[in-house]
Amino acid sequence: MTPSTQLQLRTAAWYGDSVVELPIPAEWDVTTFRPPSTPTLSDEQILDCLKHPVGQPPITELCKGKKRPLIMVDDLNRPTPTARIMPLLLTQFEQAGIAPGSVTILMGGGSHGASTREASIHKVGAEAAASCRFLVHQPSKNTVRVGKTSFGTPVHVNREVMAADFVMGIGGVYPNNTGGFGGGSKIVMGVLDLRVISQLHRQHKGAGWAGDGFESAFRKDLNEIADMIGLRSLISLHIGGDRELVRMVCGDYRQYYPQEVTYAKEFFSARKPDNADVVISNAFPNDLSLTFVHMKGVYPLRQAASSASRIVVAACSEGEGFHGVYPIVRMPKFHEQRDRLRRITLMTPAEIVGKIAGKITGKLGSASAKRSPAGLAHASVQSPTPAKPKNPIWLYLTRKPVRKMPSPVRGIRVMESWSEIVGQIQKEQGGRSPLRVFVYPCAPLQILN
């Protein structure tokens, strides 16, 4: 191919945060949807935010007299620049009479696979990790039962959370499929027992990518859990396209969370790729693993026309990755059955009997509806389904993997050669020229309108 330009994309979040240059053929007409350029917050602006929280006193007052504060932080699968604010936050604790050695930082990854400790320390900051008690949550160990929500969800949380006398959190506001957006009370998911995380995912309907989940049962259930474990204050961060800190708010998340979701929607708004011949989705800043590239990095590709060629760019620095509730790569044997059995251990014998009786009743009712004319009429009504994509998703690895990656995985074909991918795209498009190409440089954050 004859390149006309170099497409520059960020890659390898938490593992270098470097820039990759991809040669683009001259016959490609490229449109890149970058978020607006916004100044990075200064230390003075961060400190001012900490001193003026929304709806509650500052940390220096909330923590007076406390001995065992705990800070929940999200894991590396969230691009939150926690290290930027941690030193200033610890200064606030010290002003309240609490030395860093008395502060516990708990990284909550929920059902996500564990990252290396070195990378995790990079996220919270080396100074904070060294001076505080820095722990990483293990969802199948060291949890304690707290109670049950009004939705019937049994709450088991990391034991360290319940041992603390002040609990706060630091997280970001990013789109996802379960709650529409992360942030707010969803930060508690990271420190729950794996069985509880699974039940929350399975018993509540998801809001859909960037959907409105404020009043959903899922969000209300999380709000109750947050209250039960004593979440007192939350710091919410926003990043720009290069993973730099551009906005921050703290205090009572119940008062400020909706407006932060609105900000994220507007800041990362981009056009849908409905008439593009080629769609390039950069999985940064969620390009940690193949698992999370599939979950968060290919959203624009799923919005493309069925005839479009589709490329996702990612480093996959942690290789295949893992999700304990919804495994993507190398599905463990009998995963669904084992997951169901784990959730059963949360139930009392009476609840198990009631669950079985409810399923039997439901099946009998369903069979009766199928036999009735009304049931047949209802079954005959089908909603239209989107056209199936004709082409696979080509994953270009921006760095050589430590371990050979499986391919294909869920329609994704892993490649280490950009030129080979370009050649495949030209074949898919039948040698047509020019090709209309849409590029989404931070796809996991972008909201398509």
Image (tube, rainbow, N blue to C red):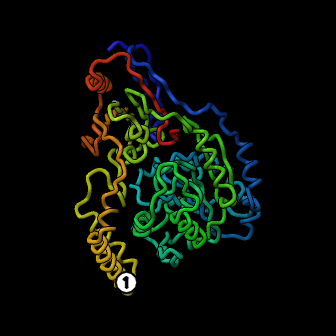
Say if residue 75 shows up in the picture: yes
User: Is residue 133 at all visible to an observer of this figure?
Assistant: no
Q: Where is residue 119 in the image (x, y as percent from the top left)?
A: 46, 47
Q: Which sits in the foreground, 361 or 155?
A: 361
Residue 26: which quarter of the image? top left
Q: Percent position (x, y) of residue 256?
A: 68, 55
> Residue 228 appears in which quarter of the rendering?
bottom right
Q: Residue furthest left?
A: 333
| Relative image position of residue 391 (x, y in whole percent) | 28, 34
- Going 60% across and 39% down the picture, which residue do you hit? 267
The foreground one among 415 and 120 is 415
Three-letter amino acid code of the residue under disc 1:
Gly
330 up-or-down from 152: above or below: above
Which residue is identified by label 1? 354
Return the residue nearer the eye: 312 or 8: 312
Query: In the image, is residue 42 above or below residue 152?
Result: above
Most extreme residue toward the bottom is 350
> In the image, what residue occupies the spot 22% across and 61% down?
333
Q: Looking at the image, is 361 positioned above or below residue 332? A: below
Q: Quadrant of residue 235 in the image?
A: bottom right
Question: With 119 as the anchor, is 254 left or right in this view?
Answer: right
Tell me if 63 is positioned left or right of 206 in this view. right
| Crowd class of label 1 (few under 14; some 14 to 19; many from 20; radius 10 Å) | few
Q: Is mark 1 on a helix, strand or loop?
A: helix
Left or right of 217 in this view: 414: left
> From the image, which quarter does the N terminus lie in?
top left
Front in this rendered view, residue 90 or 52: 52
Q: In this figure, what is the number of numbered marks? A: 1
Residue 85 image position (x, y, % from top left): 64, 48
